Image (tube, helix red, strand yellow):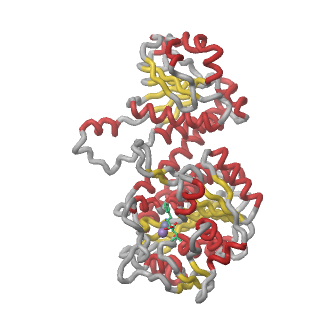
Amino acid sequence: MKIIVSKSDLQGIGADLLVLPCSSAGLQHEGEKVLSPFGINPQVLKSFKAEAGEAVVVYGGSQEYSSARMMLVGTGEGKKLEDWRKAAIAIGAKAVELKSEKVAVDCSGVEALASAMGQSVATLAATLVEGSVFGSYRFDRLKSDKLDKKNQDAKSKKIAELVIVVPSGVFEEAEKGGMEGKIVGSCKKMARDLVNLPGNYLNAEDIAKAAEESGKKYGYDVKVFHKKEIESLGMGGLLAVNKGSDQPPTFTVLEYKPKGKTKSVVALVGKGVTFDSGGISIKPSENMGEMKSDMSGAASVLGAVEAAARLKLPLHVIGLIPATDNMPSGTAQQPGDVITTYSGITVEVGNTDAEGRLILADALTYGKEKYNPDVIVDVATLTGACIVALGYAVAGLFSNNDKLADEIFQAGEQSGEKVWRMPLWDLYDEQIKSDVADVSNTGGRGAGSVTAAKFLEKFIDGHTNWAHIDIAGPSFIPKSGGKANGGTGFGVGLLVELLKKWS
Ligand code: BES
Ligand code: MN
Ligand code: ZN
């Protein structure tokens, strides 16, 4: 999608779809004044209330605007960034539905809107672009359309051009924001594609390849450890999970280090289980296919490192991605097995379906040891229990550092990728004690997402600035009949917001 920030007149912009964002208050007080210059019949106000993300397409507007269609999109009360994001997503979704190739958005009121929201014009522009890209996303690369000719058309008709029309006084700021939104939007899209690719299209090697491609394209280093090297390193957690598989594991280390002074060293760790069958502790077959999304943490980390490189943030960012599938077979690890992780800590594998924490354990210890980072954040689809606790819209946050927890919470509010903090009290350690090994990978009934986090905490070797984000819920929206369900790219926006804060 080409993004054009324009200070020219709306008239003669010649878009397929001309979008007019409206707030509920604005419409109530001066609806006719807003609509009449566009030749829009105020009758529309009977049904359109400008709720956030509400959209109505109107035909027969004034010829001067030479747009085939106009669309009113609601920004709610016009006070919350969240509502602006909803409007942006609606713009993208509607544009795809209407097959509009050139979309123009009237942002003449962006300064007033920004100040009402306590945000910058750049942020509003970024959110508009990122939201439109997000809303227009469709995962259709595996559709041949042999059975549905109509679709062929739809596939080729994606928004080609998004024009944001702003007052000349804020042109530069809007352009800066627009470009940033485009980068974050594109990194999110990459993450969503990886999440949506099923196990037979994306294995551990493929994740490593995706990272290598990104690194090459955007100028950062990527080192891939293959099975032999993983064995020499002694990554017993990753190897144990991989034992049942016919496909080798990978451990990918991404390193973005800009020239000149960097503010801090940030390690991001992402769970890359390309398909989680549960292993010998096999999952029920219903909806098991959704477990192709068990590498969402890896996808978010890759997306965030790529974004950091493209935005040229003054930070040294390391991405660590342990990847494998989790399969049952004659060679698979068995419940009751005791394994030795990279750290030397032994683990009793009470349940082979608690595999994420085993591969993360190795990556966490490795990241801490090799890079001595100022901060470590891991992102993982770790527990069903986290979905039970917080649902599909919010991620669980666990941290041993209050300041870091607060920063991540704020980044969640700003990026729209919300997190809610959960406890890490030592009293939960009781549940993961093992009679035969140093620790058990299962904590029994109750507080499943907390005991998983307590397990991870053992592998950061006393680091005092660590956070774990359990994205099991918001990373993947199961079939809902909607068109854009599936992978969400959750984590990319949150991590980028956090990295920007530290820049
Ligand atoms: N990948 C799953 C967690 C998950 C469940 C993510 C549903 C997304 C949707 C993880 O590996 C897992 O199986 N966790 C177990 C842990 C249990 C065996 C201790 C779980 O949550 O049931
Ligand atoms: Mn599992
Ligand atoms: Zn898993």
Would residue 16 appear left or right of 428 to someone viewing this image? left
When asked about the image quadrant of residue 436, the answer is bottom right
Q: Residue most toward the left?
A: 147
Q: Answer above or below: position of 248 versus 96.
A: below
Residue 427 found in image quarter: bottom right
Q: Is residue 169 above or below residue 482?
A: above
Which image quarter: residue 180?
Answer: top right
| Residue 29 picture location, percent across and down | 65, 15
Residue at image x 49%, y 11%?
41
Return the x and y of residue 428 as percentages of the image width and height. 68, 72
Inspect this view and state whether residue 95 appears.
Answer: yes
Please tell me which residue is depicted at 42% across the width and 54% down the height of the picture.
196
Choose between 2 and 67: the one closer to the eye.
67
Residue 212 visible, this orientation: no
Quick one: which residue is furthest to the bottom in this view? Answer: 436
Residue 335 image position (x, y, % from top left):
47, 82
Question: Number of marks in the image?
Answer: 0
Residue at left offset 38%, top offset 73%? 247
